[in-house]
Amino acid sequence: MTVKIYLCGGLVTDWQDKTIEAFEDIPDVEFYNPKMFDIIGYYPEVHLYGPMDRYKVEDCDIIFGFLEASNPTCVNVVGEMMLAK
């Protein structure tokens, strides 16, 4: 069984890459990393960002939330964590 992990948090540092690297020797782990997507360029209609995240949060087994010091608000992280609950 594949365990799916959603990485929610700031997009400035490389915390997502470090987290994925920490699991590289563990089989059957799949990550959804929103940092991989240029959301504005890929989805010109920004209102699609929320539904995409909601779908991925609901599809994952585990959610990691990381609050970056450079993040002016934590609204998105808290919102994604609330979706997971």
Image: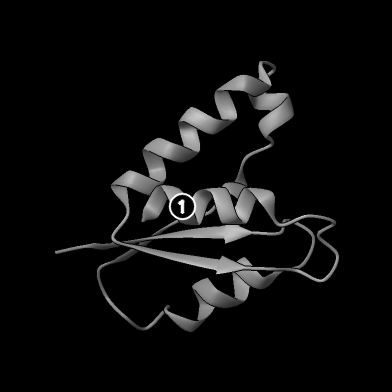
Count all numbered tags in the image, as a single digit.
Answer: 1
In the picture provided, is 11 more to the left or to the right than 49? right
Q: Nearer the viewer, residue 85 or 19?
A: 85
In the rendered view, tell whether residue 1 sits above or below residue 26.
Answer: above
The kind of residue tagged 1 is: Met
Q: Which quadrant: the N terminus?
A: bottom left
Give the residue at x 28% y 60%: 61
**Residue 75: image location, x then y, percent:** 68, 50
**Residue 32: image location, x then y, percent:** 45, 53
Q: Residues within 10 Å of mark 1 (few under 14, many from 20)?
A: few
Residue 68 sits in quarter: bottom right
Q: Nearer the viewer, residue 27 or 63?
A: 63
In the picture provided, is 60 more to the left or to the right than 42? left
Secondary structure state at the residue bearing disc 1? helix
Give the residue at x 56% y 57%: 8
**Residue 82: image location, x then y, percent:** 46, 52
In the picture provided, is 26 more to the left or to the right than 72? left
In the rendered view, tell whether residue 2 sits above or below residue 27.
Answer: above
**Residue 39: image location, x then y, percent:** 67, 33
In the rendered view, tell whether residue 62 sits above or below residue 22.
Answer: above
Residue 6 sits in quarter: bottom left
Please name the residue that numbered disc 1 is placed on: 82
Q: Which quadrant: the C terminus?
A: bottom left
Q: In the displayed orientation, state which residue is furthest to the top.
A: 45
How are the colours assigned in the image? one colour
Give the residue at x 25% y 68%: 28
